[in-house]
Image (cartoon, coloured by chain):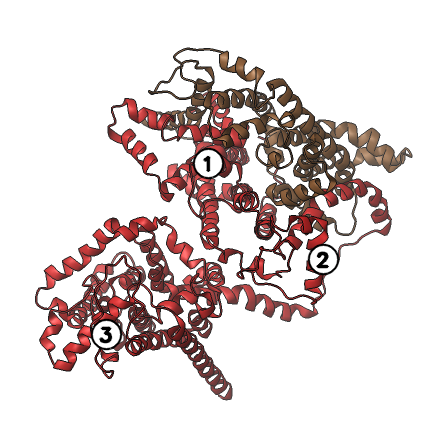
């Protein structure tokens, strides 16, 4: 660290970095290669690092038909509707609760925080069965509404947890100043806290969006009509059918991952901080 | 003085009680268990020895050892036990793969089993002298009961190996400074003699000797161990060897050849025998045996708390280590051996049920006795309640309301519903009734005592079109179903190994990137962050393709390379499959998915360690490894542990990876609770069992969160400003 390292050490360091980079890139490159190679359509006969016949035709096919009777755009539209719905519901319905957790003391607050954290780390499977039965009872199965509600339940605890951190970061002095000027709680919230916390709330919303956007297996319990599947669900369908249309799978994977990867890399620090969950005590 | 007598009386009563319980449970098993594999063979060996003794053909002992892969001592003792009985025709030979012969002479079987039972009872009683609770745990441990109530070779060496270690411990305690003592005393001789008996009964049980030697070397210290301890160790092993030879008459005519034969047999049996291959147990199968009670003839054993004993054992291990290290070494050596040994029969775990029971007793003390004691002591201390203002509480209500309603409907209600479901036999058959309120009806009737709970093991369970109350026993017994023990162990192994690998990778990379000589740090970091940014299921798909045995790159690379070298090996492995490889593949994919998060967190934490600390250490002469060990690691650890706990929770709940890999990985017990719960729901329609698994997931989650909360406070005030 402080002292100078030898050439040998330097080489070892770089060797390790290159090896890990290869490990990371290897499967990614394989998928990209599949998506762009028109010569093999997923079933190569020999090992190649580069496409034999570079082509975009797989993407064109996929554009027309990403899943059974559904085009890429339609599936994307469904994804966006459902995920955006879940994100908005989580943020709008959770914001005031997050604010209360950040600013008020009330009985059961500690237990509530613990529960919130637990909800954040709950596997979605744990909520799936009752929600499935609920959807059946209410007869809203196979509507985008059902999916939106399910994804809201997956995303909301984390959204509330994040927004609470956002409100806590707003300096209390600003609020006190507003109180002195005669503003009530609601007014202070609306004019002081909310604008200041907005960027952080935005990140909470993006996160909630991504939870819905990248959920690909459980959704199938709530949807039966093939016109109402999301992009991620089309992928799991290809997988389950067993036909393994690798090229198609690769093309959809690549295309649907690009925006997520960009968002993650741009918002790296904020996301990391959110996912570390902070402490219970604050 | 009086107090002392009271204590001794209580101790004696406790030992007696353990003996009675152990004996009673074994007697029940002796009478009720059907004939098991191998019992016919060992009874036949006993018949042969009894015949030799009747005719006074003592020379015959040197030429007789039916199933010669195991030394004869236990078989000879079985022979003595049937001596008073009338002679019966020899049991016919059967291949080892054949199912056990149920038509054995009943009286002979009973006598031979009784020998095992008495030895088993003595084992529990002996352990009870050291620690009554440990003895009790051993007495009720169902696998121990089973194999010390049958004509198996386990009961004798299990008992003698316990005497071996107790003799050694007595010797150690008699010499307050063992590093100075020379020569040998009575206790040590007892220990050596019984080690010889152990070896002459079943080789496997000699792990106890390995543990003793390690402990011995550890106390005598590094520098002079060979001068001080070596003569004693040699003497001790020499006595053991002589006793072994004397107790194994079959060796007398041709010691080296016959010993070699019997030992080589095990090696070829482990890799060649058909029944070993077809069982296809994963390397961690011994842990699966430890995680469940005997799944066959359940009703014989009354109590099925083997899993509880194992869990308490994990909790109590460190205390046992402090109190009497040699038990811990015994457990460690035995587990190591069982893991690497390819044959995985359930009876092998008897080599370590003694230390497990001992650790469990310590664990019970730590988990139950001490908290109760301290609660009793602190009963008068009033807890200070945080000051709550009524005004603020009222003010907060409207703010909380929308969130409470939404989360109540979307999260709390489902969780309560799960709990209710897990107390019934709700399944695909009874779905109509269940949705129309059947679940609540049954749970209410059950809790209020109006209907009786049906057993989860009964044939009625889940086989009617109406929901039935099953009570809390379903959740309690969830790991007793089919592969329950297997998936519990898998879950633990999975969480520990995957987080461990991710931590090594992630922290290692963070340290590398933190080195001065590394340029373009951001470039490297951006590459390494990719797996984190890619949705988990997409990453899992990538790896599914890479590992595909036909078209994946790993297999393809082997193809074009002309099928030689390492690549070919990989390809063969992929085709051969097997649970061990499957776990490895899953771990590679999981490491890829998970390490970037730990790397980022560790990088952020490293930035928090001020440079001055390094400078100060450098002045004091620290460099390289010592710098890392003394400065970086201790400062980094408290910051990283909460991150590892979060990652452990994610690994514990990992779902998509298993969902994606399910088509190519199909072994019993493979999958996290989340995945098993899903597949039980989806493919078996056993809704209540799925719900029961979820309830357990939530309990574990709460435990991990409490851990996180405790460690999270250690890094309080730290903000991760990467």
* Earlier residue among tags 3 and 2: 3
Q: Is residue A15 left or right of residue B235?
A: right
Disc number placed over residue B661 in the picture, else none: 1
Question: Crowdedness of circle 3 by 10 Å Cα count: few (<14), some, many (20+)?
Answer: many
Q: Is residue B592 left or right of residue A195?
A: left
* Marks 1, 2: nearer the viewer: 2
Location of residue A182 with respect to B478 vertically, above or below: above
Location of residue B94 with respect to A7 vertically, above or below: below
Could you say whether the residue bearing mark 1 is in a helix, strand or loop?
helix
Between B517 and B71, the one nearer to me in the picture: B71
Between B454 and B700, the one nearer to me in the picture: B454
- CA separation in Å, label 1 and label 3: 56 Å
Q: Residue at x 25, y 79 (%)?
A: B82
Between A281 and A227, the one nearer to me in the picture: A227
Choose top left, top right, bottom left or bottom right for residue A27: top left
Q: From the rendered image, report the letter of the chain displayed in red.
A: B
Q: Which residue is mark 2?
A: B441
* Earlier residue among tags 1 and 2: 2
Q: Which residue is mark 3?
A: B189
Q: Is residue B89 left or right of residue B171?
A: left
Q: Residue at x 26, y 79 (%)?
A: B81
Q: Position of residue B722 (x, y in %)?
A: 57, 30
Could you say whether the residue bearing mark 3 is in a helix, strand or loop?
helix
Q: Position of residue B664 (x, y in %)?
A: 42, 36
């Amino acid at each position: 660290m402080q002292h100078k390292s030898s050439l040998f050490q330097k080489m070892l360091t770089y060797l390790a970095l290159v090896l890990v980079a290869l490990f990371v890139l290897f499967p990614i490159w394989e998928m990209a290669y599949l998506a762009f190679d028109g010569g093999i359509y997923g079933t190569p006969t020999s090992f190649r690092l580069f496409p034999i016949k570079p082509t975009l035709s797989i993407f064109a096919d996929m554009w027309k038909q990403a899943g059974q009777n559904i085009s890429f755009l339609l599936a994307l539209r469904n994804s966006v509707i459902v995920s955006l719905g879940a994100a908005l519901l989580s943020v709008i319905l959770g914001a005031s609760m997050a604010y209360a957790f950040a600013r008020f003391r009330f009985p059961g607050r500690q237990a509530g925080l613990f529960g919130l954290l637990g909800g954040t780390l709950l596997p979605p499977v744990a909520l799936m069965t009752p929600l499935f039965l609920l959807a059946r009872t209410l007869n809203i199965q196979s509507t985008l509404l059902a999916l939106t509600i399910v994804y809201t339940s997956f995303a909301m605890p984390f959204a509330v947890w994040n927004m609470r951190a956002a409100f806590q970061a707003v300096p209390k002095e600003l609020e006190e100043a507003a109180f002195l000027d005669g503003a009530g709680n609601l007014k202070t919230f609306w004019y002081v806290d909310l604008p200041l916390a907005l960027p952080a709330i935005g990140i909470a919303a993006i996160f909630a969006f991504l939870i819905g956007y990248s959920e690909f297996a459980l959704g199938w319990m709530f949807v039966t009509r093939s016109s109402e599947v999301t992009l991620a669900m089309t992928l799991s369908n290809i997988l389950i059918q067993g036909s393994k249309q690798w090229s198609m799978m690769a093309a959809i994977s690549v295309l649907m991952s690009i925006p997520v990867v960009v968002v993650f890399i741009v918002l790296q620090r904020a996301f990391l901080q959110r996912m570390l969950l902070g402490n219970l005590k604050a | 003085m009086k107090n002392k007598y009271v204590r001794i009386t209580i101790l004696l009563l406790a030992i007696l009680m353990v003996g009675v319980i152990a004996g009673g449970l074994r007697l029940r098993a002796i009478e009720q268990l059907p004939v098991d594999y191998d019992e016919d063979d060992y009874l036949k060996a006993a018949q042969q020895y009894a015949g030799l003794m009747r005719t006074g053909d003592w020379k015959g002992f040197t030429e007789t050892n039916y199933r010669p892969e195991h030394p004869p001592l236990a078989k000879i003792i079985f022979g003595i036990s049937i001596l008073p009985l009338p002679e019966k025709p020899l049991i016919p030979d059967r291949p080892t793969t054949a199912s056990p012969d149920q038509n054995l002479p009943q009286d002979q079987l009973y006598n031979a089993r009784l020998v095992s039972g008495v030895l088993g009872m003595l084992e529990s009683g002996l352990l009870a002298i050291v620690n009554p609770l440990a003895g009790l745990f051993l007495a009720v441990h169902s696998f121990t009961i089973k194999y010390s109530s049958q004509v198996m070779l386990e009961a004798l060496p299990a008992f003698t190996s316990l005497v071996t270690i107790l003799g050694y411990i007595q010797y150690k305690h008699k010499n307050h400074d063992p590093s100075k003592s020379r020569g040998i005393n009575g206790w040590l001789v007892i220990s050596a003699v019984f080690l010889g008996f152990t070896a002459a009964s079943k080789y496997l049980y000699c792990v106890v000797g390995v543990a003793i030697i390690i402990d011995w070397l550890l106390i005598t210290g590094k520098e002079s161990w060979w001068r001080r301890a070596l003569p004693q160790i040699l003497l001790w092993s020499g006595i053991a060897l002589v006793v072994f030879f004397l107790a194994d008459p079959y060796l007398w005519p041709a010691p080296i050849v016959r010993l070699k034969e019997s030992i080589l047999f095990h090696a070829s049996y482990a890799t060649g025998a058909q029944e070993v291959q077809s069982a296809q147990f994963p390397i961690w199968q011994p842990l699966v045996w430890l995680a469940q009670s005997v799944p066959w003839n359940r009703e014989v054993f009354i109590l099925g708390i083997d899993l509880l004993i194992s869990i308490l054992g994990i909790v109590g291990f460190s205390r046992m280590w402090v109190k009497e290290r040699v038990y811990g070494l015994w457990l460690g050596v035995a587990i190591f051996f069982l893991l690497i040994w390819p044959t995985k029969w359930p009876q092998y775990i008897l080599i370590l049920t003694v230390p497990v029971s001992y650790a469990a007793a310590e664990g019970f003390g730590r988990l139950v006795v001490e908290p109760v004691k301290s609660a009793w002591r602190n009963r008068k201390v009033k807890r200070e309640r945080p000051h709550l203002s009524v005004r603020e509480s009222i003010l907060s209500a409207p703010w909380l309301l929308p969130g409470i309603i939404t989360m109540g409907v979307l999260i709390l209600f489902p969780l309560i519903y799960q709990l209710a479901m897990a107390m019934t036999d709700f399944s695909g058959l009874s779905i109509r009734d269940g949705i129309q309120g059947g679940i609540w009806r049954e749970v209410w009737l059950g809790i209020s005592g109006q209907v009786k709970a049906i057993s989860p093991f009964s044939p009625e369970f889940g086989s009617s079109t109406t929901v039935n109350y099953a009570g809390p026993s379903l959740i309690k017994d969830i790991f007793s179903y089919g592969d329950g023990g297997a998936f519990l162990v898998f879950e633990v192994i999975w969480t520990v190994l995957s987080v461990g690998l991710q931590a090594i990778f992630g922290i290692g990379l963070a340290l590398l990137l933190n080195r001065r000589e590394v340029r373009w740090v951001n470039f490297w970091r951006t590459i390494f962050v990719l797996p984190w940014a890619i949705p988990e299921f997409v990453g899992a798909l990538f790896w599914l393709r890479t590992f595909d045995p036909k078209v994946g790159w790993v297999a393809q690379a082997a193809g074009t390379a002309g099928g030689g070298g390492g690549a070919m090996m990989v390809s063969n492995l992929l085709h051969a499959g097997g649970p061990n490889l499957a776990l490895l593949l899953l771990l590679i994919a999981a490491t890829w998915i998970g390490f970037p998060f730990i790397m980022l967190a560790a990088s952020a934490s490293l930035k928090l360690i001020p440079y001055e600390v390094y400078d100060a250490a450098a002045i004091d002469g620290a460099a390289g490894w010592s710098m890392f060990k003394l400065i970086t690691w201790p400062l980094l650890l408290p910051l990283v542990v909460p991150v590892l706990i979060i990652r452990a929770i994610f690994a514990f709940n990992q779902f998509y990876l298993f969902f994606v890999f399910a088509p190519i990985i199909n072994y019993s017990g493979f999958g996290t609770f989340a995945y098993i719960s899903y597949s039980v729901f989806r493919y078996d329609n056993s809704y209540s069992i799925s719900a029961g698994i979820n309830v357990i997931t939530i309990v574990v989650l709460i435990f991990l969160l409490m851990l996180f909360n405790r460690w999270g406070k250690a890094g309080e005030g730290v903000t991760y400003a990467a």
